Amino acid sequence: MDTKVIYRFLAFFMLSVYGCSCDKEGGGPNNDNWTIPQEVKDYSLFKPGTYWIYEDSASGALDSVYVYDLQMGIDSTTSGNFEYFYEYSMHNIDGYIDNIYVHTKWTKQWNLHVVWKDRFKPGVVNEWQNFLMVYPFVPNHNYYCYTSDGIHTYVKSFSSFNVLGHDFTNVAVFHDTENNTEYNSATNYYVSKNIGIIRKEILDSSKVYNLLRYNIVQ
């Protein structure tokens, strides 16, 4: 079995979840057709051609992040039909790639949706993996990722949040105490519905990346 698949399964197994109701017998109310909620897609699924340009508030350095590939579909197995997507984007500042993905085969067991965030670079052995967000949003509930030492929590939401003079709506804030995809720093991600990450705070280094410009492909 692929090492990544093993890690992802173990990571999900180690989650501390609320209200777990496992559906292990029969097809359940949806006849074992497991779909990704539109709310999850609105916050995390973006098509190729989409890009975001972030500015480091301390140095003024720019990081352009562009989506170059999106794989999505239904994984049909004897256990059910599971919707998934894998979204790949590259950072121009360092050449690293983010893989944002969801697979609902774990949703069947755990009754929640994890949006994963991998960080890797072609030709570099190391790969880092953590949560971008866990849905439904439960304030201050702790989630533990097997592939990272940090604790992931949903902090709160803003109906409107201003970044560099622009108001973004439906903004959810997520905190990680030790995010291995951000050099093991404590981080805050501000994620806007239909826009993506609008602000990233790398707390150990006091770096703040604010969304300067963007283009969302519909």
Image (cartoon, rainbow, N blue to C red):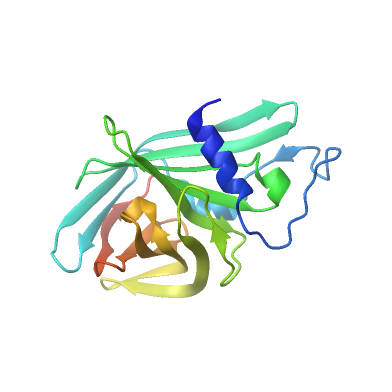
Give me the residue at 54% from left, 43% from top: 102
Residue under the image location 29 percent in, 67 percent down:
204
**Looking at the image, can residue 218 be seen?**
no
Total labels: the figure holds: 0
Q: Nearer the viewer, residue 7 or 212?
A: 7
The extreme front residue here reads 149
In the shown orientation, is residue 116 left or right of residue 57?
right
Rendered location of residue 174, percent (x, y): 46, 65
Q: Position of residue 132 (x, y in %)?
A: 46, 54
Residue at image point 55% right, 46% down? 11
Considering the image in quadrants, where does the C terminus appear? top left
Q: Is 194 rendered above or below residue 30?
A: below
Q: Where is residue 36 shown, x and y percent of the image?
A: 62, 46
**Picture quadrant of residue 161:** bottom left
**Residue 69 is drawn in which quadrant?**
top left
Closer to the camera in the image, 2 or 174: 2
- Would residue 93 appear left or right of 121 to someone viewing this image? left
- Tell me if 98 is positioned left or right of 102 in this view: left
Q: Is residue 101 visible?
A: yes
* Whole-percent x, y for residue 15 in the image: 60, 54
Say which quadrant the N terminus sits in.
top right
Q: Say if 157 sits above or below 191 in the image.
A: below
Q: Nearer the viewer, residue 86 or 126?
A: 126
Q: Quadrant of residue 207?
A: bottom left
Image point (24%, 66%), residue name: 205
